[in-house]
Image (cartoon, coloured by chain):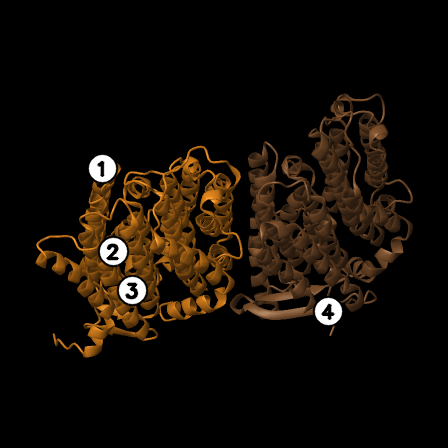
Amino acid sequence: MLLSLLIFLPLFFAFVVAILPEKAIRPASLAMSLFHFLLACVLFYRFDPHKATLQLVERAPWVPTFGISYFVGIDGISFWLVLLSAFLTPLVVLGSWTAIHKSIRAFHICLFLLLTSTIGTFVAMDAILFYVFFETSLIPMYFMVGVWGGTRRLYATTKFFIYTMAGSLFMLVAIVALIFMTQDQLGEMSASLLDFYKLQIPFVANSFMNTQTLLFFAFSLAFAIKVPMFPVHTWLPDAHVEAPTPGSVILAAVMLKMGTYGFMRFVLPMFPAATEYWAWLFMLLGVVGIIYGALVAMVQPDVKKLVAYSSVSHMGYVMLGLFALNVYGSTGGLYQMLNHGVSTGALFLLVGMIYEKTHSRQISDYGGLARVAPIYTIAFLIVTFSSIAVPLTNGFVGEFLILLGSFQANRVFTLFAVLGVILGAVYMLWAVKRVFFGGDGKLVTEHAGEDLDIGAREMIVLAPFVILIFWMGLFPNDFLNWSKASVNNLIENRTHYELTIEE
Amino acid sequence: MQIDFSIIDFMLVGPAVALFFFSCVPLLIKVLRGNVEQNSFATLIYAYMGIVVAAGFAISMLGTERTAFDGALVFDGISSFTTLIVLLVTGVALTFSRDSFSTNSRQFTEAMFLTMNAAVGMLTVVWSNDLIITFVGIELFSLCLYILIAMSLEERLSKEAAFKYFILGSFASALMLYGISFIYGTVGSTYLPDLLQATPSLLATNRLFLLGFILLLTGVAFKIAVFPFHSWAPDVYQGAPTPLTAFMATGVKAVTLAFLLRLVASQAFTVERFWPFVDVLQWLTVMTILVGNIGAFRQKSLKRMLAYSSIAHSGYIMIGIIAAGIGGASMLGASGVMFYILSYSIMTIGAFGVLHLLESRADSDLTVEDLKGLASEKPWIALAMTILLLSLTGIPPTVGFFGKFFIFSAAIKQGLTWLAVWGVVGSVISVYYYLRPVVAMYMETPVLRRDTLGLRPLSYFAISFMALLVLLVGLAAEPFYQVVLTSVAKVF
């Protein structure tokens, strides 16, 4: 019942928001999303981290003719992603308290619909159900960017939608092919992932036109676009820059994870031979993404765009770790997903906060902000350290594990990835220098008499992020232990992966 | 020949009789009142009564498997399912007609009479078990539609559209009749079961039969606007009054496809001699998808856009038809087609209905620009339109998604994966133009004040109902799919 509640409660909240009086929307949304987060915390009691099984399973037939069912469950891989989604929503509601002016009602409806679809994506264990949530998540995000976005929002949102849709439709074809394969091999049509794992999919090395390779690429394309990996990343900077702050936060922190989660849930265990054979390609693209993202971020005049490209770079690390195909790499990849959610989410919030006051995101307009906004500067610096993986912060743990894993798998790629770490420090610190230090910039002079620093509400929003950054950096095992069993199971039994249901 | 009609035969054709009877009542009243038009609402009520009685007959005959009138008409799953779709779209289209500026005139009674009788023609096609009766049905609804389009109060485009439709429609009918004559010449019968039985062997041996069969298929391809016989559709759909466009785009296509489904049940596609033509048909399907989607991409007028999109949907349905025809798991293909007909009818009539509701004059031709800022003025219509467009795009959990899912599944099962991939490519292109109205409605600020639109509660209700159906049939796809499966089980 718990998982279904977590999925559909936000949908109910959306209806509640639809009928509430305008003034009550924000407090009510905050209360409801907090309640939802607390409910998600019940998972800590109900989920047993020592078992690599699928837990809290709920199952009901949906379209039995095709073996499609409403089938949800949670394991160590999806555990933290569900919590991350639930954790961010109240913060986003609070963070957008003053940032969103028009159609507050519709905005909060979108926010709750997004929560439904993201949690659904992470706990769905039926391929079609997964696809439904995966696609549905596009719609609220599409509106969020399109309605509350910046000047080029229409271009950005349409591009975002078409890119993602293009990838996922090929995935649909692949899912259908797999469903028929279950009929041939297991005797009964089923869209359940557990049955997909059992399939023996023919694979031929050195060729492209064979079943496993084609299916592998159909899924990979869908997820690579969502991640986004290097050659198909171009929608991301547009969408991020044009999205309103809350949209950017959710997009970066949760929606990109759907892609990497998809790799872990579908691609790695379902197509082990093709994964092994093509891992070099994805590691290569991951490394290219790391360096390319960092280099492009370096020359961005717009802070938000800089953060967006840094996302490309960070997600490159995740891909590198996942396709290292060893325990360190995958653990690091999973950890880096959370880190990226926390640090990039916080960065977008921070950028949004200052933008609200100065209405500019041009780095050249700033300078000397540290003197007028000291608390803001401290928060920004902490998050920056997390983003560039300074030891003691969460980013360090993730990147370290990933590099450890990829070193075992491929030393050349690791060498270049390490180069990316340095580049990451360069672009972030250089931006920090230009924004916060140096002589008073144009904006600081213009807003001379005003208080540019953050207030109590903003501090409350940022505090959980800062706490998490250090907590995850100092005591990573508090987090890793929850997913350890599942990740180990995934990597060690990759060639004959099986997921059993916890009774 | 012993002529022996039982009472059940008349019961079975009850829907057509009911429609015809109630369509005559207002006409009779008008004549008796000295050619004075009565209140259009009263006319509509008679139409509703006819449809309700017809639906009663149709529902009571659900599950029957028999022929009537010496085997001339057949009542099976496909018939009853398509009958219900036809009745649904007729009711909705008449509701729109009454509320539209282009059709609600001094001659609404006549318009209603013609619409109802077009529906009778459609039902005849659906039930027909004989090529000649099919032809009569097609001519009946076509003639009604020619006149209906020409009756529009819009002066410029509708006349052109009616004329174009008339000429091209007659051309298609002629081709079809020509084909039927060859078939009759070789088989010695126009009776469909005889034909279906003879097809595999005759197709392999007899060239005249082959020619006749291809001509018949060509005529059908004209009606459902398959490339390269699609070019009439955008002009006619744009020129016709919107309620009629909605009626044509759904009703005509549904019944013609049901007929086509009966034709491909003949296993014609499995005959080795016919394989080259099946290949051609596959390419035409791909072209239909591409032409429809790329054409829609470039349109300014929303009606034209939906017209091209309906060509694209014909393409998707053709995938299912081919999957149903080539043997093997043809059940999947056939049921996919039937389900798609249902989903296509619901979302297309709904989308055209929204356009109709926004038209403020008889000659309105809405463009994307006209929708700007609609969400703030008419949130409910904008929401309904968004749901319908998302369904046309095939976004889950709407019915459009499951329609595509079933069709593509059938194609993949039958080894036609490449067709499914083209279908997917088409769907990706379609995202752009289906989203454009959504962008305009929600994300752009209104430029001009639009004319205040009168309250048209019935149309309003019909559109909301369609949007709701799109979601409901999508979420509860299984029961509907079961109905479809049983409906095609006997034929395939």
Occupied quadrant, residue A46: bottom right
Amino acid carrying mark 3 in the image: Leu
Quadrant, the C terminus of chain A: bottom right
Q: State the SS at label 1.
A: loop
* Left or right, A389 with reference to B164: right
Front one among A113 and B184? A113
* Labels 3, 1: front one: 1
Mark 1–mark 2 Cα distance, whole angstroms, equals 44 Å
Q: Are marks 3 and 1 on the same chain?
A: yes
Which chain letter goes with mark 3? Answer: B
Front one among B97 and A51? B97
Which chain letter goes with mark 4? Answer: A
Q: Are marks 3 and 2 on the same chain?
A: yes
Q: Colour of chain B?
A: orange
Instruction: State the residue position of label 4.
Output: A500
Instruction: State the residue position of label 2.
Output: B209
Mark 3–mark 4 Cα distance, whole angstroms, equals 51 Å
Amino acid carrying mark 4 in the image: Thr
Q: Residue at x 16, y 53 (%)?
A: B37
Q: Can the viewer see residue B275 in this picture?
A: yes
> Residue A349, how many percent across, how many down?
74, 41
Amino acid carrying mark 1 in the image: Glu
Q: State the SS at label 2.
A: helix
The tag on residue B196 is 3
The tag on residue B469 is none
Q: Residue at x 21, y 47 (%)?
A: B105
The tag on residue B155 is 1
Amino acid carrying mark 2 in the image: Phe
